[in-house]
Image (spheres, grey):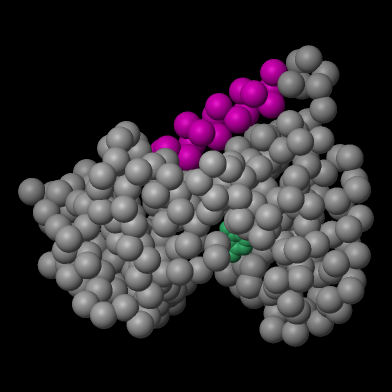
């Protein structure tokens, strides 16, 4: 038997259509429109592609876009001053600083500088803290984890009591995904490069979220029959015969895992489009915090 494919692209389209309708309604009522500022520092080609895709989506949905392209050697102070200006700008509801930043910049200090009310990425320590508190709500949930949860709930609306393996403990994906799974009453195990018997933990999990940045790490025989598998990995590997010389693969060995999983997300066309859709949803929500 082959798994149901969780089509992130299709799911993202339906979320974006809802956002577009809401923005058109605001336009008709002459209400203020949401604006998103994107800040890209340096020349990392993958970051450049992601930011371009975010800017294109804002235009498609009627969100106003303010893009800042800063030099690789941009000093910390210049970046922080830009953020402080955007914090005060009434036309900007959301500020996104694309990560990773060049090595000389302190990511932590940069994230602290963003107003939590404009933190549409949901990664400011204030929002991350609220996410981890049982009776609190963050102003924004982080985008990739929100997309992951929506994808899981598209095939299984109630995950209460399920075991979940989250592979990766980054501040932007792994950790907040585990928090969000717990908020949905699942039981997450946070796995990382020091975790022993990762294969066994996966075999006991009803849900696997792979966000390790390791191509093909999760093998088909690690997947419990019928489990939900969400692949967050975006890895570029050489492909001599392909037109671009490389191809994109996830952290899951799709060919073998699709035979055992109940539902699985592909790469590309899985989590990637959902991250952008959730960013747009957060930018629309940010209007409430003006
Ligand atoms: N780099 C990779 N993913 C993301 C993301 O979701 N937000 C930001 N700001 N940077 C990223």
Q: Of residues 232 and 122, which is closer to you in this image?
A: 122
Say if the magenta span includes residue 21.
Answer: yes
- 188 or 284, nearer to the observer: 188
Residue under the image location 85 percent in, 67 percent down: 80
Q: Identify the image quadrant of residue 76.
A: bottom right
Q: Which residues are magenta?
A: 9-25
Q: Quadrant of ligand 1?
A: bottom right
At x 78% / y 31%, what residue is drawn? 33
Give the number of callouts: 0
Q: Nearer the viewer, residue 53 or 39?
A: 39
Q: Is residue 118 visible?
A: yes
114 vs 17: above or below: below
In the shown orientation, is residue 56 left or right of residue 84? left
> Main structural element of the magenta stretch: helix, strand or loop?
helix
Q: Is residue 61 magenta?
A: no
Asked if residue 27 is positioned above or below residue 233 in the image, the reply reads above
């Amino acid at each position: 038997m082959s798994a149901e494919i969780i089509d992130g692209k299709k799911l993202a389209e339906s979320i974006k259509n809802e956002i577009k309708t809401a923005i058109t309604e605001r336009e008709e009522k002459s209400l203020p429109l949401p604006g998103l500022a994107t800040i890209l520092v340096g020349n990392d080609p993958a970051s450049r592609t992601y930011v371009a895709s975010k800017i294109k989506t804002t235009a498609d949905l009627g969100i106003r876009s303010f893009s800042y392209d800063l030099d690789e050697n941009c000093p910390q102070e210049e970046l922080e001053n830009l953020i402080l200006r955007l914090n005060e700008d009434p036309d900007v509801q959301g500020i996104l600083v694309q990560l990773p930043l060049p090595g000389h910049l302190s990511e932590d200090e940069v994230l602290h500088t963003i107003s939590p009310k404009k933190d549409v990425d949901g990664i400011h320590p204030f929002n991350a803290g609220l996410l981890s508190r049982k009776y609190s709500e963050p102003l924004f949930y982080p985008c990739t984890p929100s997309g992951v949860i929506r994808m899981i709930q598209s095939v299984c609306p109630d995950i209460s009591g399920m075991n979940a393996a989250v592979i990766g403990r980054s501040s932007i994906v792994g950790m907040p995904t585990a928090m969000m799974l717990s908020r949905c009453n699942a039981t997450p195990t946070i796995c990382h490069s020091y975790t022993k018997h990762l294969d066994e933990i996966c075999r006991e999990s009803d849900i696997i979220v792979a966000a390790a940045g390791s191509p093909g790490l999760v093998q088909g025989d690690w997947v419990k029959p019928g489990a939900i598998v969400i692949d967050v990995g975006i890895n570029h590997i050489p492909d001599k015969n392909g037109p671009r010389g490389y191809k994109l693969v996830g952290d899951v060995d799709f060919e073998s895992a699709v035979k055992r999983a109940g539902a699985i997300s592909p790469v590309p066309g899985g989590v990637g489009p959902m991250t952008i859709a959730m960013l747009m949803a957060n930018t629309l929500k940010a209007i409430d915090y003006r």
